[in-house]
């Protein structure tokens, strides 16, 4: 039975609405932390011009492969194992875009930093990084729901938690990437687009 993430069902259309313009002239996208693989199927279906590469840790691959096999899409690549903390990623091309959803807040800073730096290194010149999830602004929550969510995250893993936009900008800025647009999304989430 395929794994289903309820959050994907709620946010996949709003994410597609933003990415429609952002990825209009792109060809190849690397998705980091694909989880169940639902986003990859949904977005590859809607954007047939994109070659979509899902990736995640080894334990996620069986479920992702079920979604991939059932979809049978020519532009959706077989999921690959990718641990963002490893020095060498199994990435053989420079991607036009890197997309990740609901990952940065679920991990500690060191893992989030490895994800962001690896994303930047996986891009071709002029490529974009698109990050979906909750973020703080100057250490302040965007709403009470995010404050409670952050408490839940930290109770589960003290290293995890909602990150400041400014911190993400600082990490990606080390690789010449600048925050180009910020899109308000459902449930106090944002889509940050770096270029």
Image (cartoon, rainbow, N blue to C red):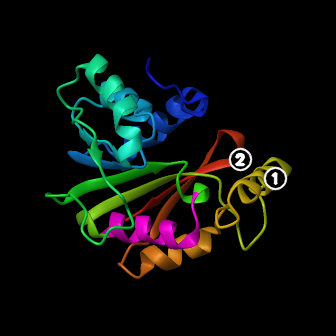
Q: Is residue 150 left or right of residue 168?
A: right
Q: Looking at the figure, which quarter contains the C terminus?
A: bottom left
* Residue 158 screen position, x and y as percent: 70, 65
Query: At x 78% / y 61%, what residue is drawn?
Result: 141
**Is 58 included in the stretch rendered in magenta?**
no
Q: Give the residue pinned by disc 2.
A: 188
* Residue 136 screen position, x and y as percent: 70, 64
* Residue 47 screen position, x and y as percent: 30, 31
Image quadrant in which you'd find residue 105: bottom right
Q: Is residue 180 left or right of residue 137?
A: left
Q: Which residues are magenta?
A: 107-120
The residue nearer to you, when weighing 42 against 32, is: 32
Query: At x 20% / y 58%, what residue is drawn?
Result: 91
Query: In the orientation shown, which residue stands out farthest toward the front?
Result: 59
Query: At x 38% / y 49%, what residue is drawn?
Result: 57
Q: Which mark is residue 143?
A: 1
In space, the residues marked 1 and 2 are separated at their CA atoms by: 7 Å
Image quadrant in which you'd find residue 129: bottom left
142 relative to 42, above or below: below
Residue 43 visible (yes or no): no
76 relative to 103, above or below: above
Q: Which mark is residue 122?
A: none
**Is 114 included in the stretch rendered in magenta?**
yes
* Residue 43 screen position, x and y as percent: 37, 32
Q: Main secondary structure of the magenta part?
A: helix
Q: Looking at the figure, which quarter contains the N terminus?
A: top left
Query: In the orientation shown, which residue stands out farthest toward the right?
Result: 144
The residue nearer to you, when weighing 180 against 68, is: 68
Q: Are marks 1 and 2 in contact (CB under 8 Å)?
A: yes
């Amino acid at each position: 039975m395929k794994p289903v993430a309820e959050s994907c069902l709620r946010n996949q259309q709003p994410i597609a609405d933003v990415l429609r313009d952002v990825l209009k002239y792109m060809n190849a996208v690397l998705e980091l932390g694909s989880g169940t693989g639902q986003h990859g199927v949904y977005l590859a279906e809607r954007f047939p011009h994109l070659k979509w590469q899902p990736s995640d840790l080894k334990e996620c691959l069986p479920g992702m492969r079920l979604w991939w096999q059932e979809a049978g899409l020519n532009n959706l690549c077989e999921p690959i194992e990718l641990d963002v903390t490893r020095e060498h990623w199994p990435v053989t091309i420079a991607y036009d875009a890197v997309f990740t959803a609901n990952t940065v807040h679920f991990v500690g800073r060191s893992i989030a930093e490895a994800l962001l730096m690896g994303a930047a290194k996986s891009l071709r010149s002029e490529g974009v990084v698109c990050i979906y999830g909750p973020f703080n602004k100057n250490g302040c929550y965007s709403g009470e729901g995010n404050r409670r969510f952050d408490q839940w995250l930290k109770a589960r893993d003290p290293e995890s938690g909602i990150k400041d936009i400014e911190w993400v900008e600082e990490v990606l800025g080390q690789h010449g990437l600048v925050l180009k647009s910020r899109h308000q999304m459902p449930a106090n989430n944002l889509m940050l687009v770096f270029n």
